[in-house]
């Protein structure tokens, strides 16, 4: 096993920013210290002028495999991930067929083995009739249980109250929820159809997928979790009002946690005029006041995790009219650069984004020996140059769908290199051809 020495870098880890070298032995970090000798290494990477962060752990992605691979697949999207400094991902169950039993989970793991460029794990999806699978699933099977408490595809909308009671009372794994109230949304859709027919403008999206729909559903989830002492993680918050449901403090002290996605920290409803259905997502991007509230929620430790909800669709699918255009956008290749831009803009600190996008997902899900720069941990890390601008061009995109709402932007920072399991899988602007991703392991409950 070879040894790699990274020298002259500035580490961002566990609330500290400090200069140090990192010696990697095989797939593990052997030593973090200054003045390490190059004679002990087979390869030396000079990180002069750069910062070294733990690789990001994205706790919410949609890679579309199986069944929807015309949009994306595990190799294409995991390659995009490592190009953006994301070294691990947790993938959602609304594929075709959906991942709603342990056999489907096993089949997904078999698909990812030897094909994923980043480390991987998968959620078990809840339905109105798979409570026995939910009771039996363990950390050896899945990273968590995903509950769509709002519109979803196929049979994955869990809208039966008795079923929700059983899920929240019986689940042994963390329950991650998509919270929108479907009756409220349907009533809003009908109201706008009466006004516009089928030609509803995209600007209506945050009124249709309204703040009230989000708050009603997330309030129910929190109430169920408090009553049943469930480990609850509410995904992709979009409103300032929902922040009142959560407590401040370190993630280790909480059994109810919250996530925000990079696009809800970046866009607001004023962007629909230019972006249209390209930024249609569920829950919807809402007001500038909501965006600012979410930013404060991150800063004040009401929000614990930052992720992407990476959800690619083809350009042709997204160019349809409002009701036909699917919700979701591709983001995983540039999520770290979006956050680094907000560091440049004085919104967040480097320590905050590392905590929310690397440390906290590892702690929340019990990811074994990843998410931190620590001796003996897996060597998953990203080297970034905060002063090297980067243009987002169509040619630079690694997504199978081949588009991004960020095309034409110039970020202030660049991804210099990404290391997964000790291997430099992205360097000098190019990913390696050999996938190095491994199945994530989780601590037992």
Image (tube, rainbow, N blue to C red):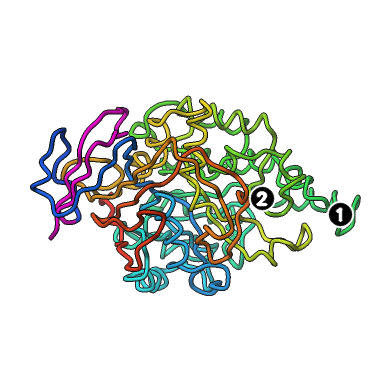
Vertical arrangement, residue 354 with respect to residue 72, above or below: above
Distance between the alpha carbons at the discs numbered 2 and 1:
21 Å
Q: Nearer the viewer, residue 183 or 257?
A: 257
Q: Mark 2 highlights which residue?
A: 279
Q: Mark number for residue 193?
A: 1
Q: Secondary structure at mark 1?
A: helix
Say which quadrant the N terminus sits in. Answer: bottom left
Q: Residues within 10 Å of mark 2 (few under 14, many from 20)?
A: many
Main structural element of the magenta stretch: helix, strand or loop? strand
Q: Residue at x 76, y 63 (%)?
A: 320
Q: Secondary structure at mark 2?
A: helix
Q: Mark number for residue 46?
A: none
Where does the image place residue 344, in percent across and percent down from the top left?
A: 49, 30
Q: Residues within 10 Å of mark 1 (few under 14, many from 20)?
A: few
Q: Quadrant of residue 424?
A: bottom left
Q: Nearer the viewer, residue 19 or 123?
A: 19
Say which label, 2 or 1, has the lower sequence index: 1
Say which of marks 2 and 1 sits in front: 2
**Which residues are drawn in magenta?**
1-26
**Apparent side of residue 152 relative to residue 42 in the rendered image (left or right):** right
Where does the image place residue 397, in percent across and percent down from the top left?
A: 53, 59
Where does the image place residue 32, in percent across and percent down from the top left?
A: 17, 38
Residue 136 shows in the view: no
Where does the image place residue 143, in percent across and percent down from the top left?
A: 37, 55
Residue 18 within the magenta-colored segment of the rendering: yes
Q: Nearer the viewer, residue 33 or 326?
A: 33
Q: Residue at x 82, y 50 (%)?
A: 201
Q: Residue at x 58, y 57 (%)?
A: 158
Residue 26 shows in the view: yes
User: For the view shown, which residue lies furthest in the left direction?
Assistant: 39
- Proximity of marks 2 and 1: CB atoms separated by less than 8 Å: no
**Apparent side of residue 85 relative to residue 268 in the rendered image (left or right):** left
């Amino acid at each position: 096993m070879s040894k790699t020495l990274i020298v002259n870098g500035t580490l961002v880890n566990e609330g500290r920013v400090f200069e140090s070298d990192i010696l990697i032995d095989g797939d593990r970090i052997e030593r973090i210290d200054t003045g390490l000798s190059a004679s002990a290494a087979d390869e030396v990477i000079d990180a002069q002028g750069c910062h070294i962060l733990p690789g990001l752990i994205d706790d919410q992605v949609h890679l579309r495999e199986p069944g929807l691979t015309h949009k994306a697949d595990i190799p294409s999207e995991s390659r995009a991930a490592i190009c953006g400094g994301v070294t691990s991902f947790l993938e959602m169950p609304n594929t075709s067929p959906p991942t709603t039993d342990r056999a489907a989970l096993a089949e997904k793991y078999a698909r990812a083995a030897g094909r994923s460029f980043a480390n991987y794990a998968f959620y078990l999806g809840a339905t109105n009739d798979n409570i026995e699978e939910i009771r039996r699933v363990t950390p050896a099977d899945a990273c968590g249980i995903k509950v769509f408490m709002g519109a979803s595809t196929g049979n994955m909308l869990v809208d039966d109250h008795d079923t929700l009671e059983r899920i929240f009372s019986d689940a042994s794994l963390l329950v991650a929820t998509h919270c929108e109230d479907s009756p409220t949304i349907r009533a809003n859709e009908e109201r706008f159809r009466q006004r516009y027919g089928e030609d509803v403008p995209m600007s209506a999206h945050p009124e249709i997928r309204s703040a009230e729909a989000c708050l009603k559903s997330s309030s129910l989830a929190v109430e169920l979790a408090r009553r049943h002492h469930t480990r609850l993680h509410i995904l992709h918050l979009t409103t300032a009002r929902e922040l009142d449901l959560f407590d401040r403090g370190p993630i280790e002290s909480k059994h109810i946690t919250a996530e925000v996605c990079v696009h809800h920290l970046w866009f607001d409803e004023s962007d629909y005029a230019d972006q249209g259905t390209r930024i249609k997502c569920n829950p919807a991007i809402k007001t500038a006041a909501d965006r600012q509230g979410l930013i404060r929620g991150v800063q004040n430790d009401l929000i614990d995790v930052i992720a992407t909800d990476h959800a690619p669709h083809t350009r042709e699918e997204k160019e349809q009219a409002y009701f036909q255009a699917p919700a979701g956008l591709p983001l995983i290749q540039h999520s770290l650069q979006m956050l680094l831009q907000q560091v440049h803009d004085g919104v967040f600190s480097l320590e905050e984004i590392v905590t929310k996008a690397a440390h906290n997902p590892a702690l929340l899900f019990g990811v074994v020996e990843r998410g931190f720069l620590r001796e003996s941990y897996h060597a998953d890390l990203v080297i970034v140059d905060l002063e090297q601008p980067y243009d987002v061009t169509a040619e630079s995109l690694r997504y199978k769908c081949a588009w991004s709402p960020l095309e034409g932007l110039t970020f202030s920072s660049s991804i210099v290199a990404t290391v997964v399991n000790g291997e430099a899988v992205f360097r000098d602007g190019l990913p390696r051809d050999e996938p190095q991703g491994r199945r994530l392991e989780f601590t037992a409950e």
